[in-house]
Image: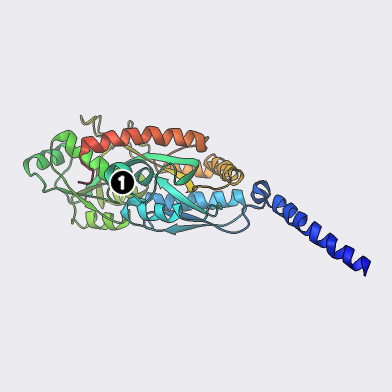
């Protein structure tokens, strides 16, 4: 009887200690060692087929190989990335849900809209930079506009008649279109879409007059003769489009914009997990196949940009976009 009573007493005393040891064993560092042990979902705020989707899918494959797991790309289009951003901001912060955080939801939307469903800096764990890219202004192959000057001259003579598409309010394509109007003193009509593919269908069909989009999307259509490129918004000509002059070369130096994207997750991801993701992303951005793919698409990658450097980058970009939104008049009234 005494032996039985002693055994029960020992179980009561030692059980809490065993639980504590188990908790310590499964603390943040142990979780990071186990991470990832199941697939990761990478949420993209745009439909399949655009630069955001295609670039993410290419990088996701290599990143998954670095982490030793599958990365599933989940498209949640709407409101220029706000729908996807809200979904990720509300997700469990365990490192298994991440977000393609582009310049719209993280940079411009807070200045475009009176209210957005998250804070670009505090609602997310900033993991690592991804890449940046200028845009190309394209018109249908049968468009009467052969040059940017011809397009601008027509817009000046016909206020509001020219239409341009974008992947949503506050997107880079929207802002640079508004910037073109403000810098040239013309009125252009913006038509927002839920993604690049439907917008591109309409510009090729002549339902809208022009669009700004990325090389990865428009180059095959330019090469096949379905679209005509008039200019690019970068500081230098794109290697894949050596005959397409920059806006500055054409005398429109104020019409210049480069879009960007990052890898972020919900606020509160354990630091050790965040560090593991950041290291793998950095290695991915230095992978020769990833470098070659993005060079061909006119994208400049962002290696060596973990969370602290990424925060500084976003803060500086927000200041630039705030000024751009104010000058373009794109803010919600």
Q: Which residue is mark 1?
A: 171
Is residue 269 or residue 242 the one in the foreground? 269
Residue 296 visible? The answer is yes
Count of all numbered marks drawn on residues in the image: 1
Is residue 36 or residue 6 the one in the foreground? 6
Image x and y of residue 23, in percent: 70, 53
Image x and y of residue 208, in percent: 19, 53
Residue 305 visible? The answer is no
Mark 1 is surrounded, within 10 Å at the Cα level, by few (under 14), some (14 to 19) or many (20 or more) other residues, namely many
Image x and y of residue 178, in percent: 21, 41
Is residue 227 or residue 7 the one in the foreground? 7
Looking at the rendered structure, the secondary structure element under dot 1 is loop
Question: Which residue is depicted at the point 46% across and 46% down?
Answer: 124
Q: Residue furthest bottom?
A: 1
Q: Residue furthest left?
A: 157
Q: Quadrant of residue 154?
A: top left
Q: Quadrant of the N terminus?
A: bottom right
Question: Which residue is depicted at the point 26% across and 45% down?
Answer: 174
Image x and y of residue 51, in percent: 38, 49
């Amino acid at each position: 009887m005494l032996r039985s009573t002693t055994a029960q007493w020992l179980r009561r005393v030692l059980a809490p200690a065993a639980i504590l040891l188990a908790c310590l064993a499964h603390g943040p560092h142990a979780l990071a060692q186990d991470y990832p042990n199941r697939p990761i979902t990478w949420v993209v705020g745009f439909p399949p087929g655009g630069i955001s989707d295609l670039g993410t899918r290419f990088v996701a494959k290599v990143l998954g190989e670095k982490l030793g797991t599958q990365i599933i790309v989940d498209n949640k289009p709407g409101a220029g990335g706000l729908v996807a951003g809200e979904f990720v901001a509300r997700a469990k912060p365990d490192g298994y849900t991440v977000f393609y955080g582009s310049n719209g939801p993280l940079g411009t939307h807070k200045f475009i809209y009176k209210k957005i469903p998250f804070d670009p800096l505090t609602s997310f764990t900033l993991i690592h930079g991804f890449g940046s890219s200028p845009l190309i202004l394209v018109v249908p192959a049968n468009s009467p506009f052969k040059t940017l000057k011809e397009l601008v001259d027509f817009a000046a003579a016909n206020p509001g008649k020219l239409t341009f598409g974008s992947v949503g309010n506050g997107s880079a394509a929207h802002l640079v279109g508004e910037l073109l109007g403000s810098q040239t003193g013309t009125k252009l009509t913006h038509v927002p879409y839920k993604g690049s593919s439907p917008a591109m269908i309409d510009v090729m069909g002549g339902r809208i007059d022009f669009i700004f989009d990325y090389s990865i999307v428009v180059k095959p259509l330019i090469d096949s003769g379905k679209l005509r490129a008039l200019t690019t918004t970068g500081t230098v000509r794109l290697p894949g489009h050596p005959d397409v002059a920059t806006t500055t070369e054409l005398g429109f130096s104020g019409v210049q914009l480069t879009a960007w994207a990052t890898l972020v997750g919900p606020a509160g991801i354990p630091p050790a997990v965040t560090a593991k993701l950041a290291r793998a992303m950095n290695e991915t951005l230095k992978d020769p196949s990833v470098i070659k793919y993005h060079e061909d698409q006119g994208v400049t990658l962002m290696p060596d940009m973990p969370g602290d450097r990424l925060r500084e980058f976003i803060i500086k970009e927000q200041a630039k976009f705030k000024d751009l939104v104010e000058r373009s008049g794109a803010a919600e009234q």
